[in-house]
Structures are given as structure tokens and as C-alpha cells.
Amino acid sequence: MTNQQIVVIEDEPAIADTLVHVIEQAGLRVSWCATAAQGLAVIQDEQVALVLLDVGLPDGNGFELCKQIRSFSTVPIIFLTARSDEIDRVVGLEIGADDYVTKPFSPREVLARIKLRMVRSDTPEPAAAQVSTDLHARQYDFYVGAQALQLTALEYKLLHKLHSHPRQVFSREQLMCAADMANASHYARNIDSHIKAIRHKLKSHDLAEVIHTKRGFGYFYEPK
Ligand code: CA
């Protein structure tokens, strides 16, 4: 969970006190704003992990504030609602809220919702997870999803050769040629250390095993 603070925007001190207490008890940082203007200022100026937002505020309503926040931030917003007509608007989602709890609420329930939202916002989208094993070349580097492996030029040439001919075995000499190392035959054994370096970079993306060793011959690439 993140170190950033949670902001409670709620004009009733008794409710705000309860929320602040339960959030602090959970070991999270929290600040309280009693007006929409104060809340907006904090969200604009500080690192905010999540917003608990009351609908009825002295200087405006939570729906308008939610829209304003959404114009510049994707911070999770949980509404504190009192009436069923408010819930209908929140559930309608046209204002961009993430969740709501109804008053009177149990502090335990609010905390559970907070933790759920904060974990979700830290977790990559399912779409990103699906493409995470898609290894592809772009602008002289290889990418897994949107993340660059940050290969050296030589590592790039080696992986490009292997990757563009799946399951074809290349000898160390062939790989040297591919990497423009043809005139430096004493580098042949270094191919192994370059392959090791590439595997190491792939390993952080759980792809170390896509480069296979063909004992006595060389290396080949096998998509995961
Ligand atoms: Ca209120």
C-alpha cells in the first residue's frame, strides 16, 4: 500500500472524526477538509491516494467537486451518501466515482472499501497483464508490453536474430555475424555472456526461458 494520504472531505465533524480515527488506526495517513474548496486545493497540491467525498458540503456539492477532480486526476473517489437519490447518481457513474458507502456506515466497512480501492489502483489493468509476455522489437530495443528491456546495441542484434527466426538454432559464429562481430573471432565465447545478460533482462519479465541452449550447437528462440 502507498505512503500517500487519504483525504476526507466531510463537513460534519463527528463523521469526519470517526473516519480519520479508523484510517489512522489502520496505519494510513489522512487529512480532513470541511469544505469543497479546501478539498480541491489539497487534491491539486498534494499527493493523494484516495478521496472520501461527502455529497452535501457547505460550499457546493460532492458531485460537482467529483467532476472537477476528474478533469485532472484519476484518484479513487468513494462517496459518502445519505439518501437513495444520491446513491442513484453515484451508481449512474456519469460523475466518475469509484464507489460509495451509505450513511450511517460502519467504520470497518469504509476501511474495507478504502483498502480495496487502493489495492486496485496499484494493480496493473488486466489488459496490461495480458500483453506482458508479448516480446517485440521497437526502435532498437525489445519491449515486454510497454516496458523496455534496455538492451545494449549488441544484445539487441543478438535477440533480434533469434526472435525473428523462432525455433531456428544459430551457432555462436552465426550470432557473431548477426551482431557485426564477424571480424573479432576471439569474441565467440563472449556470445555466451551476452546471452546470459539478455536472459537476465528477460527474467525480470518472467521470460528468461524463451532463449534456449541447444547443447553443442548454439541458441534458439521459442515464444512463451
Ligand atoms: Ca454533509
Image (cartoon, rainbow, N blue to C red):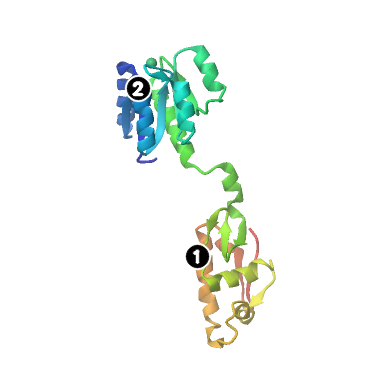
As drawn, is 92 to the left or to the right of 103?
right
Q: Nearer the viewer, mark 1 or mark 2?
A: 2
Q: Give the secondary structure at mark 2.
A: loop
- Residue 169, position as x, y percentages in the image: 67, 73
Label 1: element kind: helix
Residue 111 % position (x, y): 39, 27
Give the Cα distance between marks 1 and 2: 52 Å
**Residue occupying image coordinates x 38% and y 33%:** 43
Residue 79: percent from the left, percent from the top? Answer: 45, 23
Which mark sits nearer the N-terminus, 1 or 2?
Answer: 2
User: Looking at mark 2, is its residue's CB closer than 8 Å to ligand 1?
Assistant: no
- Residue 200 is labelled as 1
Please state which amino acid type lies under the numbered disc 1: His
Kindly identify which numbered label has been placed on residue 35.
2
Q: Quadrant of residue 217?
A: bottom right
Residue 9 is left or right of residue 93, and the answer is: left
Kindly identify the residue that appears in the image at 65 percent across and 64 percent down: 222
